[in-house]
Image (spheres, grey):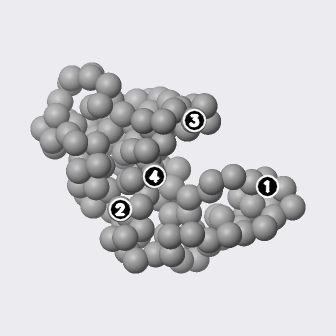
Amino acid sequence: MINNNKLLNIVLVVCGVSKEQFYSEKRGRSLVLARHLFCYISRAKLGHKLVPIAQFIKRDHTTVIHGINTIENLLSVNDEQVQTLYLSIIEAITKEYELPIRLDITAKNKQEADEIRAYIEEKYKCPILVLNY
């Protein structure tokens, strides 16, 4: 499974921020998006725990939760910038680990699709990008 150091390096390159900027107290949009995307992907897609993520980014766990919620909201309203960054990060992770880029799954409903996705992620230790249900 990808670790936080590897994910951070990918996020920094894709978002165009330095490590120093990422850890700084600055709150420019590009920096905040980089931090939020890191938190979202680390937790929601890679299954890392909140407290270790918070410790890694040198923030409080509530900041991690806020970042996750923010990215979920921005993805749900099709924010073009966030979608582009998110998909670029996922693609970089995929290429890094030579995982399949696309996997089509047919499910009866969202719950079944989520169960299938969770099973595949757990069994093969790889993130699955869900495009739609």
User: As drawn, is 108 to the left or to the right of 131?
Assistant: right
Counting residues from the start of the chain, the first of labels 3 and 2 encountered is: 3
Label ID, residue 92: 2
Residue 39 in view (yes/no): no
Three-letter amino acid code at disc 3? Asn
Q: Which residue bears the numbered disc 3?
A: 78
Q: Nearer the viewer, mark 1 or mark 2?
A: 2
Mark 2 is surrounded, within 10 Å at the Cα level, by few (under 14), some (14 to 19) or many (20 or more) other residues, namely some
Q: Secondary structure at mark 2?
A: helix
Label 1: which secondary element: helix
Q: Is residue 131 left or right of residue 55?
A: right
Q: Residue at x 51, y 32 (%)?
A: 79
Tell me if label 1 and label 2 are in contact, CB under 8 Å: no
| Residue 41 image offset from top left, x and y in percent | 45, 50
Q: Are marks 1 and 3 in contact (CB under 8 Å)?
A: no
Seen in the picture, residue 66 relative to 128 is either above or below; the reply is above
Question: Residue flagged by tag 2: what amino acid is it?
Answer: Ala
> Mark number for residue 72?
none
| Residue picked out by circle 1 | 111
What residue sits right under mark 4 in the picture? 87
Q: CA distance from mark 1 to mark 2?
A: 28 Å
Among the two numbered marks 4 and 2 on one chain, the one whose residue lies closer to the N terminus: 4
Q: Please, what secondary structure does the residue beneath circle 3 have? A: loop
The x, y position of residue 91, in whole percent, is 41, 61
